[in-house]
Amino acid sequence: MNDRSAFSGFYKKSVDERIEILRKSAGLGEEDLKRLKDGLPIELANIMVENVVGTFQLPLGIATNLRVNGKDYLVPMATEEASVIAAASHAAKLALPEGFRATSTRPVVRGQVQIIGLSDLASPAQRIMSAKEELIEEANRFAGSLPKMGGGVIDLKVKAFEEPRRMLIAEFYVDCRDAMGANAVNTVVEGIAPRLEDLTGGRCLLRILSNLATERVSRSSVVFRRDVIGDEVVDGIIAAYDFAYADPYRAATHNKGIMNGISAVTIATGNDSRAVEAGAHAYAALSGRYLPLSKWWKDGKGNLVGELELPLALGIVGGATKIHPVAQTVLKIIGAKSANELAEVICSVGLAQNFAALRALVSEGIQRGHMRLHSRNVAIMAGAVGAEIERVASTMVAEGNIRVSRAKEILEGLRGSCSEQ
Ligand code: MEV
């Protein structure tokens, strides 16, 4: 996105006007516009999963104003929740001109092989480790094109458990490059398992990747200037963070706010949001205590500093990212050149989302904003169309009474007064 000014007042535009702005800014072609309009064709859905009877759609909106490592992004988000996209856009705007700084590690995911039926653990573990280089080489034969692309199996470790059962866990570390990696990693561990059985005399039971991708971590940080957000918000957000740090009941909700952003972009890009969610929450509990995934503190100038770190196993090639037509256009809009770049954008959206939720919570509360948006849904449920939606919604908000029955009354009043004119 080169011209951010094209997006000012984006939320006030009609859907067609937004699509036109997006088309110009993201260089979309006719095919992309068709994909956004048509969604997932039933024939493709029928190939993707079993027993298909339809498709399920979510609203797709664009988060604006996001700048990460000096580059501006438009970020499509798929979510059923009102306020999420507006909140991310607003938080991203408040972070300008610096925006977010993000980094990520090498995209390494571990695959685990559970070896059972062993009478002792030390000598089979020793045999695996003595054959480490040879096993890595052999495992790479199952890694498809990854080794040629600078990825593939790069390491092997063994863990031993006596409780609750005697077993060895052989862990193969696979650099998945721009793929999420589930297929690649699962193929590697299934392929190498017979060799491990020969070597140890045990039986390989589970052969599967771990979604706790501690080797594939992204970090994003941001500074919100005190003169922009005010000292009260700075102090309030730090106090809110302390609450999440102290109490897992609050930490879960704090992290849910982060995942509102992360999952919405993960879904829009056709990535596996359950894998990301599982990894995130396990990472939050890695210390033995469930903690907030983000940290908030004050710098020497009184500005608010935030940082978010979590595992993000995401792909820009393979799986639904390539099959789902909308996901393809979404990836084009984001324009990330690598899975790591995508992860850095998504991590920054998570941090922006967290800031937005905390800011609302420490000031007006979240219900006012939610209700404003919710009121439009209620107006539609009551039968309002076109300009009626906004008029019915704003009357309900002003009255503080957002119900379908009230929306119907207002609508009848509106229509009655129009027909009298
Ligand atoms: C609602 O979807 C998300 C929040 O509950 C997050 C939070 O409490 O930090 C507002």
Image (spheres, helix red, strand yellow):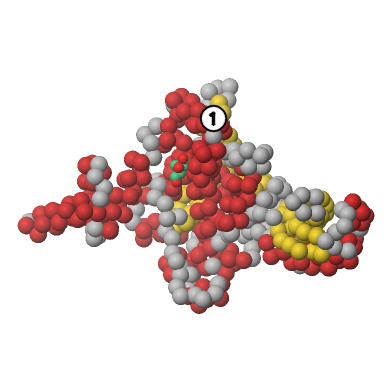
Q: Position of residue 158 (x, y in %)?
A: 83, 52
Q: Residue at x 57, y 69 (%)?
A: 323
Q: Which residue is mark 1?
A: 242
Crowd rating for badge 1 (residues with CA inside 10 Å; few <14, some 14–19, many 20+): some
Q: Position of residue 396 (x, y in %)?
A: 23, 46
The quadrant holding residue 49 is: bottom right
Q: Which of the pair 345/72 is nearer the observer?
A: 345
Residue 273 in sight:
yes
Q: Position of residue 60 (x, y in %)?
A: 44, 58
Q: Which of the pair 228/241 is nearer the observer?
A: 241
Q: Residue at x 36, y 60 (%)?
A: 16
Q: Which of the pair 152/182 is nearer the observer?
A: 182
Q: Secondary structure at mark 1?
A: helix
Ligand 1 within 8 angstroms of badge 1 C-beta: no
Residue type, label 1 = Asp
Q: Residue at x 25, y 42 (%)?
A: 400
